[in-house]
């Protein structure tokens, strides 16, 4: 026989959990939106690859090629 009595604390805790879920979804949405805007503003993919501040010889143009 299952007990189906739900205390008011369970209801409040469930509502708080839904609130935290909404905050987390909002935060993830903001971070995703900022990432999309940043990538779209770069335009050239080489700028995105060179932004890590590490010298990568394979993306440095050689003399006389450009």
Image (spheres, rainbow, N blue to C red):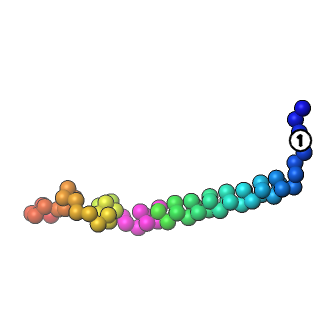
Q: Residue furthest left?
A: 64
Q: Is residue 26 left or right of residue 65?
A: right
User: What span is in magenta?
Assistant: 36-43
Quadrant where the N terminus is found in the figure: top right
Quadrant where the C terminus is found in the figure: bottom left
Foreground residue, 36 or 12? 12
Query: Where does residue 31 sit, x and y in percent of width and height?
Result: 52, 63
Foreground residue, 61 or 57? 57
Res 60 → quadrant: bottom left
> Disc 1 designates what residue?
4
Query: Where does residue 37 sit, x and y in percent of width and height?
Result: 47, 65
Asked whether residue 6 is drawn in magenta, I would say: no
- How crowded is the residue under tag 1: few (<14 C-alpha within 10 Å), some, or many (20+)? few
Residue at (41%, 63%) from the top-left corner? Answer: 39
Secondary structure mostly taken by the magenta-highlighted segment of the chain: helix
Residue at (18%, 58%) from the top-left corner? Answer: 57
Tag count:
1
Q: Residue furthest top?
A: 1
> Which structural element holds mark 1?
loop
Res 25 → quadrant: bottom right
Query: Where does residue 49 sit, x and y in percent of width and height?
Result: 31, 60
Q: Is residue 64 left or right of residue 26?
A: left
Asked whether residue 38 is drawn in magenta, I would say: yes
Query: Where does residue 54 sit, x and y in percent of width and height?
Result: 26, 63
Question: Does residue 30 appear anywhere in the picture?
Answer: yes
Question: Does residue 44 appear anywhere in the picture?
Answer: no
């Amino acid at each position: 026989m299952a007990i189906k009595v739900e205390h008011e604390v369970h209801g409040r805790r469930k509502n708080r959990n839904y609130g935290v879920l909404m905050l987390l979804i909002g935060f993830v949405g903001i971070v995703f939106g900022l990432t999309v805007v940043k990538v779209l503003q770069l335009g050239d993919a080489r700028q995105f690859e060179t932004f890590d501040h590490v010298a990568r010889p394979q993306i440095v143009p050689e003399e006389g090629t450009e």
